[in-house]
Image (cartoon, rainbow, N blue to C red):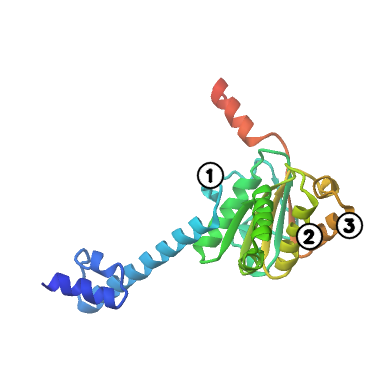
Amino acid sequence: MSSALIQDYCKTLRLGYVSQIYEQIQANSQEAYLLQLLEAEVAARKNTKVARLIKKAGFSQFKTFADYDPSWALTLPETITLEELKDLIFLEKQQNLMMLGSVGNGKSHMSVALGIEACKRGKNVSFFRVSDLISKLLEKHQNGTLPRFMRELKNLDLLILDELGFIPFHKDGADLLFSVIAECYEQTSIIVTSNLEFGQWNTIFGDNRLTAAIIDRLVHHAHILSFTGESYRLHHALSKKFGTD
């Protein structure tokens, strides 16, 4: 009977985890017991929120800094250190990150790791391959739900645009992407990963003026990270095949 009442009271008070853990806690005093119980409730709520934010972000994979090797291909600018990067200083200042370099050097890994760290801190994040975002913008535009989607993007803390440069865009798609970047300008931090240098972006957007306007908004208040050298994925694939490090 007592157990049922506890369940009912927890439901009424919206204490979703207390009823699951109250029997497991051991303490030397009532005060210590209550403190541990409330701490467990808070921790469980935080973990649930983080899991929800990570799922909502739509990451293509789950990557953290635990298995990232910054010495492989990354060259940082003088404007930010690796520690400041991991501490999300750029996010606090609504700054952008431009990650440029050849395929397979860890750009996407770092962008996802930063996004997951942001989720752990309660930030709203969305991850898109650029081609997927373009398709979604065109779809929303056609069915009349674009304004709402644009508001959702503008209200993010961090927008990650992965793999810019693999597929050229139709003019309508390029215009819509510019609208997103313009809406987020100085409001929402953006991370862009690209295998193209800025001078080659006009081959993707197909318009020199539009390309210049996009780059101008992205690089203002931005840190430009360079990824160079041999593909990390290729190196490890060959290492496994031939048994070398």
Identify the residue at horizontal 49%, vertical 56% (top origin).
55
Question: Residue under circle 1?
Answer: 67
Mark 1 vs mark 3: which is more N-terminal?
Answer: 1
Residue 74 appears left or right of 243: right
What's the distance in space between the residues labelled 1 and 2, CA to CA? Answer: 28 Å
Q: Secondary structure at mark 2?
A: helix
Identify the residue at horizontal 54%, vertical 26% (top origin).
240
**Spot occupied by residue 174 in the image (x, y as percentages of width and height):** 77, 54
What's the distance in space between the residues labelled 3 and 2, CA to CA? Answer: 15 Å
Identify the residue at horizontal 58%, vertical 51% (top origin).
112
**Spot occupied by residue 151 in the image (x, y as percentages of width and height):** 64, 69
- Label 2 is placed on what type of residue? Val
**Spot occupied by residue 117 in the image (x, y as percentages of width and height):** 54, 58
Mark 1 or mark 3, which is nearer to you? Answer: 3
Q: Nearer the viewer, residue 168 or 181?
A: 168
Q: Residues within 10 Å of mark 2 (few under 14, many from 20)?
A: some
Mark 1 or mark 2, which is nearer to you? Answer: 2
**Spot occupied by residue 160 in the image (x, y as percentages of width and height):** 64, 56
Q: Nearer the viewer, residue 153 or 45?
A: 153
What's the distance in space between the residues labelled 1 and 3, CA to CA? Answer: 40 Å
Question: Residue under circle 2?
Answer: 219
Residue 5 is marked as: none
Question: Residue under circle 3?
Answer: 209
